[in-house]
Every structure is written in C-alpha cells, then in structure tokens.
Amino acid sequence: MRSILLTIIGSLLAAGLALAGELKLVDGRAVLGEPVKIGGGVVTWKSTGQPEQAIPLDQIVCLDIFPFPARSLSEAWTDLELTDGTTLRAAKAGFRSGQVGIDLVGGGQIELPVKTVANVLFQAQREEWRKDWTTRLAQRRRRDVLAVLRQEAVNALEGTLGETDAEGKTILFTPSGTDRTVPVPLANIHGLIFERLPDASLAPVIGRVTDAGGSVWLASEFSLEGGKWKVKTSGGLTREYASGTGPSRIDLSRGKVAYLSDLKWMRVTDPLAADPFRFRAGPTLDKNLDLGPIRMGGTTYAKGLALAATTEVEYDLGGEYRDFRLMAGFDDAVSGGGPVVLRIEGDGKELLRQTLARQGRRVSVPIVVPVKDVRRLTITVEPASADDVVYGHHVHLGDARLTR
C-alpha cells in the first residue's frame, strides 16, 4: 500500500512539474509554463489557463524546462569536451581504433571519431579535479597532454597522443623530447588533452542546451515537434530525445545579454583603496564583500558585483546595448552599510542617482537604466553625506546585466 501511495504521489509531482518551466525574456519578464513546439525561430509557449503564444527566439534569454535531477553522491562519470565546445557527460566511454563509444549519463549512446574530441577528464564527478582541469586547459601548450594520478596528485606530461588499441585498453604516447612511443593503460589515465587546430567549418552557436544528464550541447539548431526534441551541435552532431524527455535548460543569452561581472572594466578608482583600515575595497565579482554568495532580500544572485563606497567603475559598451538592469541593495550577510548614493552615468551624462539606506536588514530595489548608444558606462558608489564615515558603506549589484 505504501509503495502504491508513493507511486501516486510521484505521478502527481511529475504532472505538477509539467508546467513548472520558466521562459525568461530579454526585457526581464519571466513566464511560467512549458514549450509546446519550437521551430522556424519561434517558441510556442503554453501557460496554465492562457492561450498558446508564439515568441521569437531573439526575444528569449533562457528556457528552464524542468529541474535538474539530483545525482547520487556515489555516481561516477567522464567529461568529454568536443572540438566545437560541446561537453558530453559519460557514464562510460570506450576508446577503440580511432573511435570513442559513449554511454551518456541520463541515457543514450553516441559513437564519435576521436579526432572530434578536444579533451577528456576521467572521474570528473570530483569538483576539485574539474577545477584543476579547467586551470590546466587554460594554460598555453604546444603538444598533447597525458595526465595521470599519483597519490591524488596530477602528473601531466606533454607529448604526442596516438591511436588506441582494438580492445580499448591502451593508448600510444610519445613524451616530448624522446622518440620512444609507449602504450599507456587507459585505466591509469586521469585525463587527455588533444592539441587540435581550430575548425573553420563549425556552424554558429545559437544556444547552450543542457540535458538532465549534465551534458552541455553547443547547438546551432534545436527543435521540438510532437513532444520530441532534436539538437544539432555546431560541429554537426545530432542528438534526438525520446518523447517525454529532453533538455532541462536552453540558454539563449549569447549575443543578447552581457553580465557586468563577465566584462572587463576600463578603469576602477577608489581614493580609499590604500587605507590600511579598509576591510575590502572591491569590486568583487559574483561574490559579496565577505567573498560569499550575493544574497539580497532573501534572494541569491549567481551574478553581480559588490562595491564599497567611494568606488567608481567604468566600462566600454561601444553603444551596443539598450538597457542596464540590476537589483541594487545591501547583502543580507554583510553588516553595516548605507545610506549610500548609487550613480550611473552614460558618456558623462547622469542617467540615475539613487540613495539606498537600510530599512531593517534586507534591502534591494530593481533598477532599469536605458543605455541606448552609450559608449562609456560609469558606476559610482559614495556615502550619502560627505561628512559620513565610509567604513561599512557598500552596495551590491545583483544580476547586473546589459541587454541588446
């Protein structure tokens, strides 16, 4: 009886999730519902109790279709990044004679030529190894890399990677500075980096499609028809999902939205930056001034900036954006602060002057500033009074983003 009840509850929850998706628009609005059809540059979206509406893809920032399922702590996987930037999360990956067979986490199988693989990280479920691997991928090199683990330490060797054997047990490797090629057991390998030339034949990417298994497909095309999803990557790989399954998220922000914390500022000035009694001058990116998550009014923001009073930051927008949107206020976890004045200028003209003060512990206000044709965007945070003590005065800019 208990198992039947749990099954019924699970079914009801699943049914409830069917319309739990969210579509985020360039203008900042969010619409709950689910996609019914996608094709021809348009998403047909259905909200509960509302007629279907057709929304052009160029007006959409992101589609959150259903929540990512929780993964078991004991689950292991391999991450394979392809030459077009797609990252496949594999429950199993077997290399044989120039091909790699992949059993995807979440279901599905794919076979690819090894020449389309840019790098491989085995046992990628460990966060510290993924972070280390990302750092290694960013380093300059001229040759392939073979990495092995020795007592939990990564030992990376440069050289030339060759073919795998027919049984998929070893891969040939010639270390740099030698002419000796040796077969290395794949079971002993932590990761592989293939030094590939850029591929000029790649199609333009229109979105990042993340599925329930954690694979991220850099898509040049995607569609939904009759409940079935189809995704085509920039490199030409096609992924079809069975009816009732599909992507968890489609990020279409590329070229439409630029988060301020991802841009390089032209200039930062702070007359008190050298003050030895200053806690932290900032700006801090995607963190509060305690270097923790930005949280204002009970909401956590993955993107944003933290600015101490007397800070001025300038960005070069090149006249490419229409709006600057953000939540401004004081972080829930950072004491003190306010009243302060937040000023935003465009090409030397004041676009916004707003005084922020704590009213209790949680303060955040939405701000939208038109920035059409603005080339230089300047953000200034200063005490509300010139005689005010500036220690503890700060502003956090949550979800600060520029839209085209």
Image: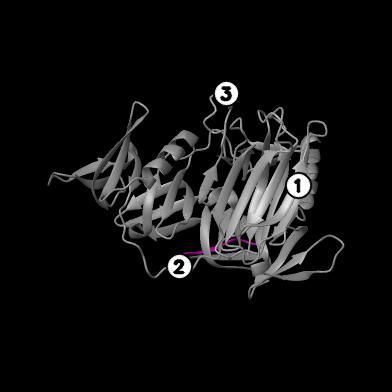
* Residue 277: image tag: 3
Chain-order first, disc 3 or disc 2: 2
Task: Tell me the residue at 75%/65% (across/down).
Answer: 45
Crowd rating for badge 3 (residues with CA inside 10 Å; few <14, some 14–19, many 20+): few
Q: CA separation, marks 3 and 2?
A: 57 Å
Horizontal side of residue 178 vs 285, given as left or right: left
Q: Nearer the viewer, residue 308 or 324?
A: 308
Chain-order first, disc 1 or disc 2: 2
Instruction: Quadrant for the C terminus, please.
Output: bottom right
Name the dominant secondary structure of the magenta segment.
loop
Q: Nearer the viewer, residue 142 or 41?
A: 142
Image coordinates of residue 176 in percent, x first then y, are: 18, 45
Q: Amino acid at mark 2?
A: Gly
Chain-order first, disc 3 or disc 1: 3
Q: CA separation, marks 3 and 1?
A: 27 Å
Q: Secondary structure at mark 1?
A: strand
- Dot 1 corresponds to which residue? 354
Seen from this angle, which residue lies furthest bottom? 40
Task: Tell me the residue at 61%/52% (across/down).
Answer: 378
Q: Secondary structure at mark 2?
A: loop
Q: Residue 209's image quarter?
A: bottom right
Decide: is 396 above or below 238: above
- Dot 2 corresponds to which residue? 236
Image coordinates of residue 314 in percent, x first then y, are: 56, 51
Task: Tell me the residue at 79%/31% (across/down).
Answer: 361
Q: Amino acid at mark 1?
A: Gln
Image coordinates of residue 89 in percent, x first then y, are: 49, 48
Bounds of the magenta segment? 236-243
